[in-house]
Structures are given as C-alpha cells and as structure tokens.
Amino acid sequence: MLVVIPWTVRLVTASLAGFDRTIEEAAQSLGANRWTTFRRITLPAILPGIVAAALFGFVSSFGNLEMSLFLVGPGRTTLPIAILQYLEWKIDPTIAAVSVVQIVLIGAAMLVTDRFVKISRVV
Amino acid sequence: MAGLTLDQVSKRYGDFHAVKRVSLAVPEGEFLVLLGPSGCGKTTTLRIVAGFIEPTEGNVRLGERDVTALPPWKRNAGLVFQSYALFPHLTVAQNVAFGLEMRKVAPGEIGPRVSEALKLVRLGHLGERLPRQLSGGQQQRVALARALVFKPDVLLLDEPLSNLDAKLRQEVRVEIRELQRSLGLTTIMVTHDQEEALTMADRLVVMNEGEVRQLGTQQDLYERPADRFVAGFVGRSTFLEGTVESAGAFRSLGGLLVHCSGGAPGPASLALRPERLVLTEPGGAFLENAYPGVVEFTSYLGAVLDVHVRLNEQERVIVQIPNRPDGQSPRVGDSVSVGWSRATGSLFAGRSDATGS
C-alpha cells in the first residue's frame, strides 16, 4: 500500500490540478450547495483520475511478488506467491490456465475503466 | 427580478483594501457596467454580489432581501464567467437544466423550459452536444442560457466577451443587450474594455484602486469626467500639467497660457480630447487658444489619423483628424497650428508626474 500511495496521490492531484475551479462556482451560483457541487460536478470531472489511480494501485499491488513475499502474514498468500511456490515443485499447464484467467481479468478491468474514462474522450 | 443595493461595502485582505466603501443602487432592469483597469476591485465587487466573497464591512441587498450573509446557492443570481465554466461532462441541455434541478422544478417542466432558454439564445438544435463540441461563441450563449433559465433576480457577467474574437464580440454584445432589455433583467457586467462598456451600459461605474471614481451615463463620463483618472481611462486625453494662475487662465509647465473655463488657483492638469482639437496651417486657427507646433509623429488608423504635435520642449498633444481622401494629411516635420476653444478641456486640481494618454 505504502508503495502505491505516492502514485495514486500524484494521479488524483494531477486531475485536480487540471480541474477548473470556476465550474464549481458556476454550480454554486446555480443553486448547488457544497456537497451537491462535489457529488454532481467535481467528482465526475475528476473521476478519470481516481479510476486510473485505483486501477494502477490494484495492478501494482496485485502483481507484486518480492514485497508480498516478505510482508505477507502467516496463513495468507497472494497469487504471485502461490504461483511461485507451485512452480517450485511441479511443471504442468495449471499456471498457463491461471495466466489466462489473469489476462481475462485485466481485460475486464480495461473494459470497466473504459466505461468511466473513455479513450475516445482523449483521442 | 429585483433591484440591487450595495451599501458601504468594503473588502480588506490584511492591509490591502480590495474594495473601499462602495455604494451602488441598481434599479430593477438596469444594465450597469463596472469598468476599470485590472486590480481595481471590479471583479471583487461582482464576487461579493455573487456571494463568493464575504465583505469585511457593509451589506448587499437584493430587492428587499439582505443577502450579505447568504451563500451563493441561496442568492438566485445568474452568473456568466469569462471562461464560460460549462460542466464538461454534461450535455448542453443538462448544463442548462442544472439550475432548475437544483430548484426542484418538476421533471416534466424542466424539458420545455430548457428548450425555451436554448431557443432564446438560438441554440435550440444543439441540446445534445457536449460543450467541447461547440465554438467559443456558442459556449458563451449556453452559459447565458444556463444563467437565465431559472429566472434569476440579477444577472452577473464577469468579462463575458473577453475570450471571443473581435468580430463575434460585437455581435454578442448586441445580442446580450437586446436579451437583457426584453427580459428586463437587472444586470451587472464587469469589463476592462471601455468600448464594450460604452456600447452596452445604461450607466457605468468607473473604479480604480478599489474605489468608485465616477458613476454616470456615457455622456457624463466622457464630457464631464470627475477626475484625472476617469478623463484618461474613458476615451483618450492628452494632459497638460501646470498651474491655474487665476480663474480662466492656465499656465502650462512649458509656458503656454491657456484660456479655459473655471478652475481654482493652484497646481492643476488640463485634459484635452484629441478629436476636439483643431489642426490648421500655421496661424490659421481662429480659436481662443492657438499654438504653433511641429508634427512629430502620425499614425494612420483607417477612418482617422492621429497626429502628435510638439508644442514646446515639454509638451506634446495628440490631435485626431478625419482621414481625408485628398491625401492632404500632415507629414512629420510639418509646421502646423493647434487650436481649441475655451470650453474644450477639463481642469483637474493637483498635478501628476505620470504622463497620461
């Protein structure tokens, strides 16, 4: 977690920095109080940054092997550790199958992200 | 709709007085323009009215309501920003609907009112677009529709035309003005563009250093400027520094004796409008004041010509003359005579070392 905090903070900060504060003022002048302004205007506007940061945090935590290896508590394990331990003793296509599942997972994550942050918006 | 009153409103940031005891009364339906250079406090004043800045002293009334302590979302003021500030993730129609949704207008009523507002600004067909798919002028009109749709008590325009190109600006000026008049909207606009201010306003407020320098109609400001600053800021003036020797006689620092109207003895400056001065052949001016000079610089402005005439070592005046087709315009180095009548020019007590333009 500590490893990805700087990245997520930067990503969210960057989307906040690119955010035009006058649109918050516009919302307030139209009758939205602070909470409504945040919910209806600010949050949707910075959502791409938040989603990107969340996904980035997830991916780098998920795929992390060396740090998890040292930090994981007894009785728990993460997927990369399990794969490593499995490979120490056996060589069979299970790992390939697991990798396919992972690829599908990542693909699904991409689709979900695109739901929030349309690539077409940027390109 | 309601009138707007500012009573002795001040805003201090530490030792800095952003706004000093500003009092204004804007009657219902009036288009008032706050005019001044950057940092003069005009935008701060507008933001106080909008509710984004709380005044240090004084109060703001909208109609009969004292709104000084109310947050912006309870003021019912329509605001148009220089950057338009449209919500980028909402369509044009959703942008316009936002103010109605916040006021809990029945969903069935929102649609018709939005399309009515969009039709008012001639964008009825673009409701489904996103703001970034529109041109600057169109975005600006969406912002206007968004500010008008909920029938605000007062319309506040913060340099709404600064981001438009010159040609479009002239069109939108007229458009906003006609809309404002037909809806009878009490409006305050902030601008630093005096041409914009003069074409749009019912009355103008000239501000400098946080203070109201003069409030009046276009003619008041132009013909009877209250002080040296207004004379230099509204329209153009050339200033002659000097002393009033006796009522009606002004002696410039360069030694010219100028017949003028009024004036109390003491240091003073005389403001002259370039288009009120008469340029003739040497010795040709039959006016109370006529001085020989040499043309030092000319600039061709299409319809008119600016001629800078040196009267003596210390003094130079700008004369604006119509551009004649016969090509008989003065050239640099020509000897000429500059004249003006006694009534031309405004006298201000006190002297300034800064040369006004």
Image (cartoon, rainbow, N blue to C red):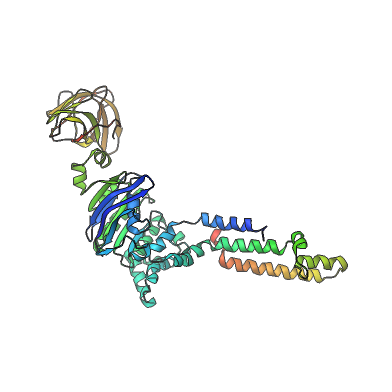
Q: Quadrant of the N terminus of chain B?
A: bottom left
Q: To which quarter of the image does residue B322 belong?
A: top left
> What residue is rendered at 52% in x and 54% in y?
A17
Q: Quadrant of the C terminus of chain B?
A: top left
Residue A94 vertical position relative to residue B86 in the rendered view, above or below: below
The answer to whether residue B169 shows anywhere in this view is no
> What residue is rendered at 54% in x and 57% in y?
A15
Task: Please state which of residues B301 and B41 is positioned toward the viewer in this rendering.
Answer: B41
The answer to whether residue B163 shows anywhere in this view is yes
**Numbered-mark total:** 0
Residue B64 vertical position relative to residue B109 in the rendered view, above or below: above
Task: Please state which of residues B119 and B97 is positioned toward the viewer in this rendering.
Answer: B97
Task: Please state which of residues B316 and B282 is positioned toward the viewer in this rendering.
Answer: B316
Q: Is residue B201 left or right of residue B257?
A: right
> What residue is rendered at 12% in x and 31% in y?
B248
Task: Please state which of residues A53 and B307 is positioned toward the viewer in this rendering.
Answer: A53
Q: Is residue B128 left or right of residue A47?
A: left
Q: Position of residue A51 (x, y in %)?
A: 59, 64
